[in-house]
Image (spheres, rainbow, N blue to C red):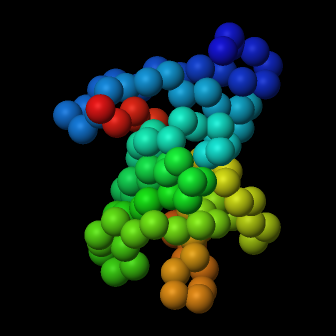
């Protein structure tokens, strides 16, 4: 996708975990999880933790990274981001939003997202 007023492509450096890939983000630096191919790994850096989110073929996501809520991978439906106003947007993440996902009948919201890093699994 070309760099336009709506979308821009950002290249991230590869790590030892996965191959780097081009990240199509909107003008706010956010992305729609549904637009990612299944098996894509997204690293979500918040003020307090780094989460790993992997999009599954069935639309669910696997997430881990919080020492209490998801120290080991769990698979959830309904992951997304919450704006400062508290409005939740399912399937969308952007810097300055809070990562939000259901767990045991309640919704967990993290500290603010500082950066998103997209990686494709081998």
Residue at the limit of the structure toward the left, as seen here: 16
Image position of 11 with respect to 45: above or below: above
Q: Is residue 66 left or right of residue 4?
A: left
The spot of residue 12 in percent (x, y) is 41, 26
Q: Residue at x 65, y 37 (%)?
A: 35
Give the image quarter of residue 7: top right
Q: Nearer the viewer, residue 111 or 81?
A: 81
Give the image quarter of residue 62: bottom left
Residue at the limit of the structure toward the front, as seen here: 58
Q: Residue at x 29, y 69 (%)?
A: 72
Q: Residue at x 45, y 39 (%)?
A: 40
Image position of 60 with respect to 35: above or below: below
Q: Is residue 33 left or right of residue 54?
A: right
Residue at the limit of the structure toward the top, as seen here: 2
Q: Quadrant of the N terminus?
A: top right
Q: Nearer the viewer, residue 110 or 56?
A: 56
Q: Nearer the viewer, residue 59 or 53?
A: 59
Q: Quadrant of the C terminus?
A: top left
Image position of 72 with respect to 10: above or below: below
The spot of residue 34 in percent (x, y) is 65, 45
The spot of residue 87 in percent (x, y) is 79, 67
Give the image quarter of residue 91: bottom right
């Amino acid at each position: 996708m070309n760099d336009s007023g709506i979308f821009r492509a950002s290249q991230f450096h590869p790590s030892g975990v996965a191959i780097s890939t081009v990240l199509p983000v909107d003008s706010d630096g956010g992305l729609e999880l549904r637009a990612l191919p299944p098996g894509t790994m997204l690293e979500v850096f918040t003020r307090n933790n780094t989460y790993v989110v992997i999009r599954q073929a069935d639309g669910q996501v696997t997430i881990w990274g919080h020492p209490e809520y998801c120290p080991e991978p769990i698979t959830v439906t309904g992951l997304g981001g919450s704006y400062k106003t508290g409005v939740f947007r399912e399937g969308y993440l952007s810097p300055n939003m809070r990562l939000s996902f259901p767990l045991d009948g309640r919704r967990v919201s993290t500290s603010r997202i500082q950066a998103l890093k997209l990686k494709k699994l081998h």
